[in-house]
Image: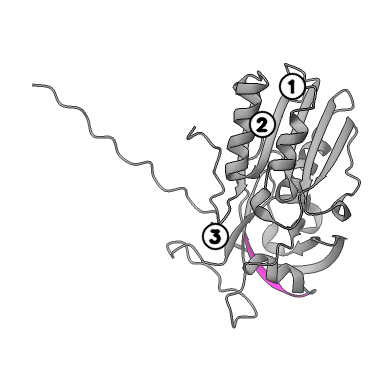
Amino acid sequence: MSTTPETSAPPPRKRRPPRRVEVTNVQVLSPAMRRITLKGTELEGFAPEAPASYIKLIFPEPGQTEPDRPLPDAPRPKSMRTYTPLAVRPDVHEVDVDFVLHGEGPASTWAAQARVGNVLFLMGPGPGYALDKTAAEHLLIADDSALPAVENILAELPSSARVQLLVEVISADEERTLKSTAAVTAQWLPRGSDHRSAGVPLEKALRSLAIPADAKIYLACEAAAMRRIRKLLTDELGIDRKNIVGRGYWKLDTINHPDHDYGEDN
C-alpha cells in the first residue's frame, strides 16, 4: 500500500522591520494625486532592487496622531496599505510616494490632510518588475493607482526602447508629463468618478491599438479589470501570455487588497 506525502503550507512571508519616517514635503501633482516625501534615519539601507516594487505603509488609527510601532509577531495592522516607492534618495534617507485621493479609507484620508512632521511606519521593499531592458517594444497598461510603477519603469528604460502607454484616470485634469529617455506614445483615458467602470476605457483603447507581437507588457489596474484585459490580449488580440505581467493593484468592494495578486488563478 502506498501513501501520498502530505504537503505542508508554505511558510508565512517574513516581514521586514518597520522604519519610522516623517513627512518632509507634500506636492500637489493633480487634483487627485499627491506626492509625499518621507524621511528618516531608519531608511538606512532601504534600496528597492527593481522598478515597480512595493512597500507597506502603516497609518495612524482613529484617535492617534502617530501609529504604534508594529511588533514582529503582532497581527497585521488594520491601517496598513501597499504603495510603490517612486524616487528613493538613500544618501539623504528620503523616499517619495504618490497617493491617489479616492475619498475613502485611512490612506486616502491621511494623504489629503498630510502635513510636514506627520509620522508613518514603512515596511519593505517587496519584489518588483523584472524589466527586460533589451526589448525594443513595451506596452504599459495602467490606471492611476499604478502610475508610480509606470514611472519607475519609464525611468529605467533605455533611449532605444519604444513604449506605448495607456493610463486610465478619473478625469482629463490628471494628465501630466512623465519623464523617460525612451520614445513614449501616451494615451490618457478619463474614466469618470464611477469606479465600477474600471478598465473599460483601457479595453476600448486596446482594441484599436497596433501591438507589436514581441512587445513586453506590464498590466496593472483593478484586479477584475486586469484579468479581463489579459484575456482580451491573449484570446482576441493574439498576444503570447508569457509576454504579459499582470498586477491587481486594487479590487472593487475590497479593503486592503493583497499586494501579490498576479491574476494566476485564471
In the visual, does 159 lie left or right of 140?
right
Which amino acid is tagged 2?
Ala
- The residue labelled by disc 2 is 130
Q: Secondary structure at mark 3?
A: loop
- Mostly what secondary structure, the magenta segment? strand
SS for callout 1: loop
Residue type highlighted by circle 3: Ile
Q: Is residue 113 visible?
A: yes
Residue that appears at 86% across and 63% down = 28
Callout 1: 10 Å neighbours few (<14), some, many (20+)? many
Q: Nearer the viewer, mark 3 or mark 2?
A: 3
Start-end of magenta stretch: 117-122
Q: How far, Cα to Cα, is label 1 from label 2?
A: 14 Å
Residue at image mark 3: 255
Whether residue 183 appears in magenta in the rendering, the answer is no
Percent coordinates x, y for residue 4 in the rendering: 20, 27
| Residue occupied by mark 1 | 215
The residue drawn where x is 67% and y is 47% is 198
Q: Position of residue 105 (x, y in %)?
A: 62, 67
Quick check: 188 left or right of 246? right
Quarter of image, res 237:
top right
